[in-house]
Amino acid sequence: MSDALAEYEADTEQLMRRVYLGVREGSLDPQDVVTLACELLDRFHHTDAVLEVVERNPAEVSQAEMTALALRILADVGFDPGFDLAPERLETLRAALGIVARDLPTRGIKGKPEIEILEDWFPVGAGVRLADGERLTWGGPILPHMCDDPATALTGLAILIQESLLERTWQVWPECPHHGLGAHGSERESEAVWWCAGDGGHILAPVGELARALGRHRPT
Ligand SMILES: [Zn+2]
């Protein structure tokens, strides 16, 4: 990429961030949306929303309409505010970690795990650091957009933790006591669960409630 193009990309990125924050904080400057639309048009992003912003007189577009157009444009170009511009995503992720952490003692893991932001990944994602310092990132980090929904964030964490532990030790966990099969994190009907593939598939337990499911079938 040439320096001029790289600079241009960085400027557009800054503009997108400003538009996003303007929408978020209710302080959107219509001129920013127009400038962004013109830049995108220059780069052949001919979406309906871009064309509408460029073609209409901004003075005749209400703030509500401009906000809706700005959101459509950001979606059209796949803009992601990451964790830094949408910090509530980290709160969702930390709450999800608190739930899946309840299952870790069934794997012999003690202590409170923490979310670790992985600045060296692109895009910036999140992994898990166990109390003993072990970092779990197998299969790739949790991406910011996965944290817009609590069940998706929880499912992503369950998968990341389960696959990271499996990769390290090849010890199957969690194991379905009915079928002797390893269960996997899965989202079913908007709920994060441990899913066993045995007998056509069934929920072993909701994520966070594994101890109860395993304890019930433990031989006495
Ligand atoms: Zn099973």
Image (spheres, helix red, strand yellow):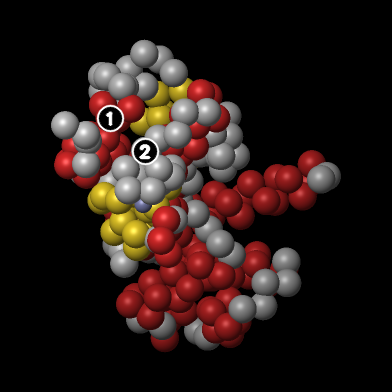
**Residue depicted at x 61% and y 78%:** 47
Q: Which mark is residue 150?
A: none
Q: Position of residue 100 (x, y in %)?
A: 28, 39
- The earlier-in-sequence mark between 1 and 2 is 1
- Label 2's element? loop
Picture quadrant of residue 91: top left
The one of 119 and 195 positioned closer to us in this rendering: 195
Q: Position of residue 195 (x, y in %)?
A: 37, 53
Q: What's the residue type where badge 2 is placed?
A: Pro
- Is residue 201 at least partly visible in the picture? yes
Quadrant location of the C terminus in the rendered image: top left
Q: Position of residue 80 (x, y in %)?
A: 49, 54
The one of 219 and 202 positioned closer to us in this rendering: 219
- Label 1's element? helix
Q: In this rendering, is residue 76 above or below 153? A: below
Furthest toward the right, the residue is 2
The one of 38 and 133 positioned closer to us in this rendering: 133
Picture quadrant of residue 190: bottom left
- Is residue 24 at least partly visible in the picture? no
Q: What's the residue type where badge 1 is placed?
A: Thr
Q: Which residue is mark 1?
A: 106
Few, some or many residues within 10 Å of mark 2 (<14, 14–19, 20+)? many
Q: Position of residue 85 (x, y in %)?
A: 40, 46
Q: In this rendering, is residue 180 above or below 187? A: above
The one of 80 and 199 positioned closer to us in this rendering: 199
Q: Which residue is mark 2?
A: 174
Q: Is residue 4 left or right of residue 69?
A: right
Q: Is residue 70 left or right of residue 42?
A: left
Few, some or many residues within 10 Å of mark 1 (<14, 14–19, 20+)? some
Does the CB distance between marks 1 and 2 fall below 8 Å?
Answer: yes
Quadrant location of the N terminus in the rendered image: top right
